[in-house]
Image (cartoon, grey):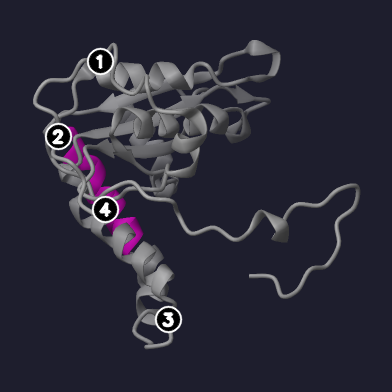
Amino acid sequence: MKAPPPPGTVDVASIGEDVRLLEGLRTSCAIRRLRPDPVPRELVRKVCEAGTFAPSGGNRQPWSFVAVTDRERRAWIAERYRRVFSEYIAPAVRAAESPDYPAEKRKVLSGAVHLSETLHEVPVHLFVAGHTRRGLPQPQALFPAIQNVLLACRAVGLGASLTTIHLTFREEVDAFLGLPPDRPSIALLPIGWPRVAYRRPVRRSIDECLFFDRWEERGTPR
């Protein structure tokens, strides 16, 4: 099943409004194969606005979103990302040379490598940043908003995934983005029109991980 081509004209007000919540949840797989076609700024605004409806302690709403769309700035980010990612992923690439390497893991690995190699072409690099507390980043306060953005991308037909590789060079990239020291970035979401179709990701049964009143051992952990 192939992904549809990017729409020629986007009705930002109506796009995504008809996607049922649970269907969107169940088919919001990470999509790392993205087209270079531009994404309208108003659509970027729409998915980020969805992020702002996430819960936050004390309703502090600690999030900030920086969408990098300029070609040269995306290339700057991609070059540094690729350098770190190559070292990070090397053990998995070597492991994948074994014929016994699981097919599903091989698929995920292939997508991650593809994203690294083509990140400069991805039209939107969305950084999510937030307040510090007692001098420390607060990622737990931002992940609900990040999940909302990912779900909104699914609803409007965009592909997206979550990566934190850039945290290895966070100080450099945050300065590049103009973020102050007390508002560090937590995540990078590469966003674009998908080259592949949405699908239900492979998941173990809820019966393997749902417990009532008390946890208990169940078979062999994955």
Q: Secondary structure at mark 4?
A: helix
Q: Is residue 23 above or below residue 119?
A: above
Q: Secondary structure at mark 1?
A: loop
Determine whether label 3 and label 4 are within 8 Å by CB: no
Query: Magenta span has 88?
Result: no
Compute the Cα span from label 2 to label 4: 19 Å
Earlier along the polypeptide chain: callout 1 or callout 3?
1
* Nearest the eye: 101 or 113: 101
- What residue did someone put label 4 on? 115
Determine whether label 3 and label 2 are within 8 Å by CB: no
Measured as percent of width and height from the top left, residue 116 is found at 26, 55
Q: Nearer the viewer, mark 2 or mark 4?
A: 2
Earlier along the polypeptide chain: callout 2 or callout 1?
2
At 38% from the left and 44% from the top, the residue drawn is 161
- What residue did someone put label 1 on? 12
Specify the segment rendered in magenta.
Answer: 72-86
Which amino acid does the dot numbered 2 rest on?
Pro
At 34% from the left and 40% from the top, the residue drawn is 160
Question: On the picture, is 132 further left or further right than 115?
Answer: right
Compute the Cα span from label 1 to label 3: 42 Å
Earlier along the polypeptide chain: callout 2 or callout 4?
2
Q: Residue furthest left?
A: 8
- What residue did someone put label 2 on? 6
- What residue did someone put label 3 on? 101
Earlier along the polypeptide chain: callout 1 or callout 4?
1
Q: Nearer the viewer, mark 1 or mark 4?
A: 1
Compute the Cα span from label 3 to label 4: 21 Å
Q: Secondary structure at mark 2?
A: loop
Which amino acid does the dot numbered 1 rest on?
Val
* Dominant SS in magenta: helix
Measured as percent of width and height from the top left, residue 151 is found at 44, 32
